[in-house]
Image (cartoon, rainbow, N blue to C red):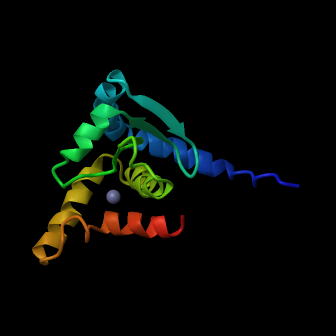
């Protein structure tokens, strides 16, 4: 037998609630994904290990290479991941899906919690990105990849 184990019914409910809870962030993500799609970009759905819409294209490449935090391979906004065409390795995807899960857990509060964590790191003289607790958790998720 080579069947995948059935998911617990409550895990579907948790996923649905997370999608609703993060929907304001996802709406913002879709707004940013729109020019990516319209300018020769593509969108695909990721279902495992978590639900996300991934948008890639020349516009995403341009946007991510001018990111205020420095050049990024990808970024997650709610359940939307915007990624460079050649930057989305499985490892990067796992990292971004960790941020998708964080958004599903924290909802609309997430961007504020993220910035607060960066500020807290900076106040202590640490790197605002590297020592952000959400980045630390996402890097930890990469190790389980
Ligand atoms: Zn990250």
Tell me which residue sits at (31%, 33%) in the image.
58
- Along the horizontal axis of the image, is 29 left or right of 62? right
Q: Looking at the image, is 14 positioned above or below residue 124?
A: above
Residue farthest to the front, as pictured: 86
Image x and y of residue 41, in percent: 38, 28
Tell me which residue sits at (34%, 31%) in the image.
30
Tell me which residue sits at (61%, 45%) in the image.
12
Location of residue 81 (image quadrant): top left
Tell me which residue sits at (61%, 51%) in the image.
11
Image x and y of residue 54, in percent: 44, 39
Nearest the viewer among 22 and 54 is: 54
Image x and y of residue 91, in percent: 47, 59
**Image quadrant occupied by the N terminus:** bottom right
Give the mark count. 0
Q: Looking at the image, is 6 positioned above or below residue 54?
A: below
- Along the horizontal axis of the image, is 50 left or right of 130? right
- Along the horizontal axis of the image, is 51 left or right of 76? right
**Image quadrant occupied by the C terminus:** bottom right
- Along the horizontal axis of the image, is 19 left or right of 110? right
> Can residue 83 be seen here?
no
> Can residue 4 be seen here?
yes
Quadrant assignment for ligand 1: bottom left
Residue farthest to the right, as pictured: 1
Image x and y of residue 89, in percent: 46, 53
Location of residue 115 (image quadrant): bottom left
Residue farthest to the bottom, as pictured: 124
């Amino acid at each position: 037998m080579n069947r995948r184990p059935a998911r617990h019914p409550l895990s579907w409910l948790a996923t649905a609630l997370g999608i609703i809870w993060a929907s304001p962030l996802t709406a913002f993500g879709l707004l940013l994904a729109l020019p990516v799609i319209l300018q020769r970009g593509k969108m695909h759905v990721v279902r495992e290990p978590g639900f996300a819409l991934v948008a890639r294209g020349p516009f995403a490449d341009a946007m991510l290479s001018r990111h205020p935090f420095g050049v990024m391979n990808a970024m997650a906004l709610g359940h939307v991941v915007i990624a460079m065409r050649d930057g989305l390795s499985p490892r990067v995807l796992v990292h971004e899906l960790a941020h998708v899960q964080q958004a599903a857990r924290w909802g609309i509060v997430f961007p504020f919690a993220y910035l607060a964590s960066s500020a807290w790191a900076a106040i202590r003289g640490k790197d605002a990105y590297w020592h952000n607790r959400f980045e630390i958790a996402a890097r930890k998720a990469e190790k389980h990849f």
